[in-house]
Amino acid sequence: MCLALPARVIDIDASGHGHVDLGGVRKHISFALLDQVQVGDYVIVHVGYALTLLDPDEAQQTLALFAQMAPTEQTPPTDQAASAQP
């Protein structure tokens, strides 16, 4: 299964490569599969390639949904066996 997140294009060089921002993580990718990508656009990235150009509003809605699903607080698992009293 593949999970694709919208990534914002940060820069593009003359060779068709550049960087995207994935929620604060910067990745080097290829834009060779897309035409007319510009800095500031949102793309879907898979295995180092930008596959699809996204509408900015759709990208923002998707990112907002993922942010809502993210846990706000992580609770460590409890070991019931260790807390059981004989």
Image: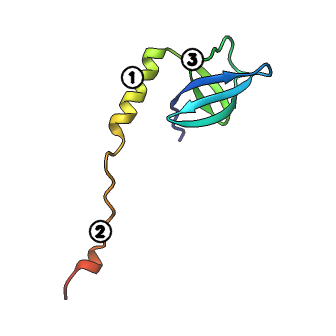
View extreme (top): residue: 36
**Residue 64 placement (x, y as % from top left):** 37, 28
Question: Quick check: 27 left or right of 59?
Answer: right
Q: Quick one: 75 or 32, which is closer to the camera? A: 75
The amino acid on which the numbered mark 3 sits, given as a three-letter code, is Asp
Q: Which quarter of the image is occupied by the C terminus?
A: bottom left
Mark 2 or 3, closer to the camera: 3
Question: Quick check: 62 left or right of 37?
Answer: left
1 or 3: tag closer to the N-terminus: 3
2 or 1: tag closer to the N-terminus: 1
Q: Which mark is residue 41?
A: 3
The amino acid on which the numbered mark 1 sits, given as a three-letter code, is Gln
* Label 2, residues with CA under 10 Å away: few <14, some 14-19, many ≥20: few
Q: Secondary structure at mark 2?
A: loop
- The part of the image, by quadrant, that contains residue 27 is top right
**Residue 28 placement (x, y as % from top left):** 68, 34
| In the depicted structure, whether residue 10 falls above or below residue 69 | above
Mark 1 to mark 3: distance in Å? 15 Å
The amino acid on which the numbered mark 2 sits, given as a three-letter code, is Thr
- The part of the image, by quadrant, that contains residue 31 is top right
Which residue is disc 1 drawn over? 61
Q: Secondary structure at mark 1?
A: helix
- The part of the image, by quadrant, that contains residue 43 is top right
Question: Quick check: 38 left or right of 64?
Answer: right
**Residue 38 placement (x, y as % from top left):** 63, 14
Q: Secondary structure at mark 3?
A: loop
* Label 1, residues with CA under 10 Å away: few <14, some 14-19, many ≥20: few
Whether pointer 2 and pointer 1 mark residues with C-beta atoms closer than 8 Å, the reply is: no
What's the residue at 51%, 31% (across, down)? 5
Whether pointer 1 and pointer 3 mark residues with C-beta atoms closer than 8 Å, the reply is: no
Which residue is disc 2 drawn over? 78
